[in-house]
Image (cartoon, rainbow, N blue to C red):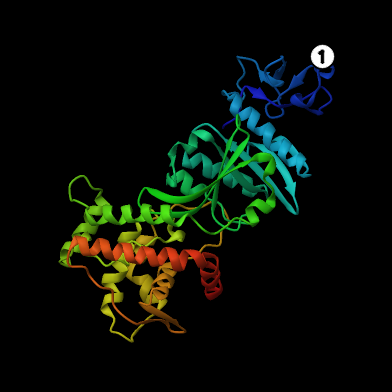
Amino acid sequence: MRGGRRLLVAKNKLGKLITAYKKNEQEISQLRHESFTCPECNEKVILKAGRIKVPHFAHEQQSSCSVRQGESAEHLNGKIDIEQWCQYRGYPSALEYALPEVGQRIDVVARIGKTTVAFEYQCAPISLEEYESRTNGIRKAGFMPVWIFGVQYLNALYNHSFRLSPLMKAAIMKEPPFKQPILLFYSTPQKRLTILSQFFSSKFKCFVQRSHLSLQKVGIETFQNMPMNVPLSSFKTYWLKEKQRLRTMQRKHISELDKRFMLMLYQQYLHPQYLPACVHLPVQSSYRLLVPNYIWQTQFLLSCWRQKNIGEYISWTEALKSCNELFTNTITTQHSTHSIHPLYEYLTLLSSFGYLKKSPQGWVVLKHPRFPKTLDEALVFDKNILTYFGETIMKKRSFFLQSMETAIK
């Protein structure tokens, strides 16, 4: 379990919880004459307070407490910053809240409205399995988990490109007060919160919107009023490169998944450079898939859409059956999210482009996509469809997503 030699909270001999960093110099001087124990293991802990370091408690070296592994100053100060933010906003809060029933200690617990929120500030590396276990423990306690990651996790961010590891895929949150999928990161030295949103995943990376805010300027309304737009020029440039990578894919040095994809195309006398521009479109709801967009979109095109005549219907059952096995390979989220199925979003996109038309029976085929004859022609088609995507779909993103959610309900 993650914890530390350093504790911010300890019990005195009367069983009262004492928060060291909140005490002034005179109170610290008095506390030096008292004895304290760890709230979790009940072993003796020592008060540590100096002119530079944050006042805290520490286990003795020979301690066998499960929370005695090293804890960084970044993590210690980050917990304090989060609790002080809660107090500044008027939310009742507690540091290092123990959950004995699941054997966990939460960094900060706060009551926000009618919801008890468990803030976990994660600076050290953590496995997906441990993340899932800790999140499940928080859920079982009836709390809403909010994970905030340290700045080292932002090493995967370059401009608007972010490498989505399985851990990051699982950690994306979309539940009140978050109106759209987000990831949170905090820099203790800068007192700055970084918000990543608008995840348009490709293969290993995704295009993201990023916001950097002073922690004191962040409120619940920050997450409720987040814009749905992305910088269109950067987005178009990013996705054109993604399309170009797909079209110039070579058989050498590719994954087993891509080898099967190339074999599927070969059996249809196709190559990635000759796929229609409507393949590998940005689909925001696909960020938890472990299969790239271009694979399942191609399979839907070849095994379902292209098999229909103009004017015929594609039912949702037919569409899903055509590539359903590809959607089983996903990262399971520990957050209670309401998300649109990636294929449904893709069908809605195709309807916006005039390929299909939504009807009570499903989708009417209005036209089939055009297969380019050369790589140069394919790249022109890609540029045209992404220009339309940016100028038409992205500018009406909020309406577009709301219309899909309404249709699903």
Query: Label 1: how many residues lie within 10 Å, few (<14), some (14-19) or many (20+)?
Result: few
Q: Is residue 59 left or right of residue 35?
A: left
Residue appearing at x 45%, y 36% in the figure? 155
Left or right of 253, for residue 358: right
Image point (25%, 48%), residue name = 255
Where does residue 49 sit, x and y in percent of width and height? 72, 16
Nearest the viewer among 356 and 392 is 392
Residue 101 % position (x, y):
67, 41
Q: Residue at x 27, y 72 (%)?
A: 303
Under mark 1, the amino acid is Ser
- Please report the residue visible at 56 percent of the width from the left and 62 percent of the height from the top: 338
The picture places residue 209, in percent across and down from the top left corner, at 50, 51
Location of the C terminus (image quadrant): bottom right
Circle 1 is placed at which residue position? 29
* 43 shown above or below 137: above
Q: Secondary structure at mark 1?
A: helix
Give the percent coordinates (x, y) of residue 110: 72, 43
